[in-house]
Image (spheres, rainbow, N blue to C red):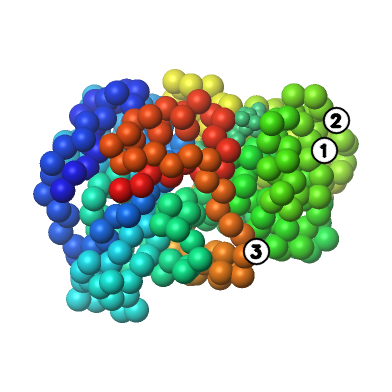
Amino acid sequence: MKAWTWDRYGPPDALALKDVGEPDIGPDEVLVRTRAASVNPYDWRHLRADPKLVRLTYGLRRPRPGLVLGADLAGVVERTGDAVTGLRPGDEVFGEVRLGSFAEAVAVPQDRLAVKPARLTFEQAASVSMAGHTALQGLRDTGRISAGQRVLVHGASGGVGTFAVQLAKAFGAEVTGVCSTRNLELVRSLGADHVVDYTREDFTERKGHYDLLLDIVGDRSLTRLRRCLTSRGTLVIVGGIASPRGGLLGPAGQIVRGALASPFVRQRIANVGWKPNSTDLRFLAELMEKERVTPVIDRTYPFTELPEALRHVERGHARGKVAVAF
Ligand SMILES: NC(=O)c1ccc[n+]([C@@H]2O[C@H](COP(=O)([O-])OP(=O)(O)OC[C@H]3O[C@@H](n4cnc5c(N)ncnc54)[C@H](OP(=O)(O)O)[C@@H]3O)[C@@H](O)[C@H]2O)c1
């Protein structure tokens, strides 16, 4: 089968499309014939080893041989391990792996898969897992969202943000989305009650206003972010679209600062570390079946043009998700 592998850390040119053996499956795993994948900042960060801490996991000088890039996927079940229940060959599924989805077949633990909602294309379904889990767990588990709260999503037009706006509305919140001028209509169309154009207005000037702030961008100090929260509000640190490149910690720098500040302030500061699981995938699938949430696809690239898809995401201005069709 064909798979995108990399034997040095670097830009998307470091990737090579190679013939590799099909993966074996363990008793709890499912072999999925991939029909679509999607690109996350996670992918180019692994490829570049940015932040440098990535090297501790995948190889200090160069990545271990045989690694295949990619996390999100959707496809058709081809084979199941002996301990797998509830999924059968021929089922259309979506979910994610830690690494390996940019390949024609992927071995996926059954607890990271769910049945694809019939109304979604494979490209839409492949766009859900990482961004959808992050938005859901950030709002519901870390943020403890409740109906009627004022929720601000900073970075509302990207992969995580487009899910977060729709999910926060589904939880009954009054939602403000921060994005640039060209994305105002998109974010409104996802259900945001208010939009703030970050090129014209600084949302942190709105003192004491929001109960919950999901920061996906990481370009503001904690002091400024806290300033626009109510005195008992919650700041959830998700990521760093705009965080500096090439450091030891990358977007995790804000997480460390948040953890250090948290014991000394009245507001809650917490970070989301997404934990993919089939229960949350089924929760998302149900909302998508009911048309309460719909993945937003910016562009779809053919599998052979994956490096171009990565370059697009790496520029930091994707509108929703970037899909890859096989
Ligand atoms: N903690 C976790 O478990 C976890 C999980 C997944 C992802 N993440 C992190 O979350 C971050 C976002 O992921 P993503 O998939 O949503 O990224 P993404 O899709 O690449 O985000 C792109 C979007 O960000 C917007 N943007 C760029 N600069 C902005 C700014 N200054 N203010 C507001 N919006 C801005 C862009 O809109 P414009 O073109 O209008 O600027 C674009 O729509 C990444 O750093 C990722 O690593 C964390």
Q: Secondary structure at mark 3?
A: loop
Which amino acid, mark 2? Glu
Q: Nearer the viewer, mark 2 or mark 3?
A: 3
Q: Which residue is mark 1?
A: 228
In screen coordinates, is 282 left or right of 226? left
In screen coordinates, is 197 left or right of 60? right
* Residue contact at pointers 1 and 3, CB within 8 angstroms: no
Q: Secondary structure at mark 1?
A: loop
Q: Which residue is mark 2?
A: 205
Q: Earlier in the sequence, mark 1 or mark 2?
A: 2
Work out whether residue 270 can be spotted: no
Which residue is at 25% across, 55% downward?
A: 106
Which amino acid, mark 1? Cys
* Residue contact at pointers 2 and 3, CB within 8 angstroms: no
Q: Earlier in the sequence, mark 2 or mark 3?
A: 2
| Classed neighbour count for the residue bearing mark 2: other residues with Cα under 10 Å, few (<14), some (14–19), many (≥20) | few
Ligand 1 is located in which of the four quadrants? top right
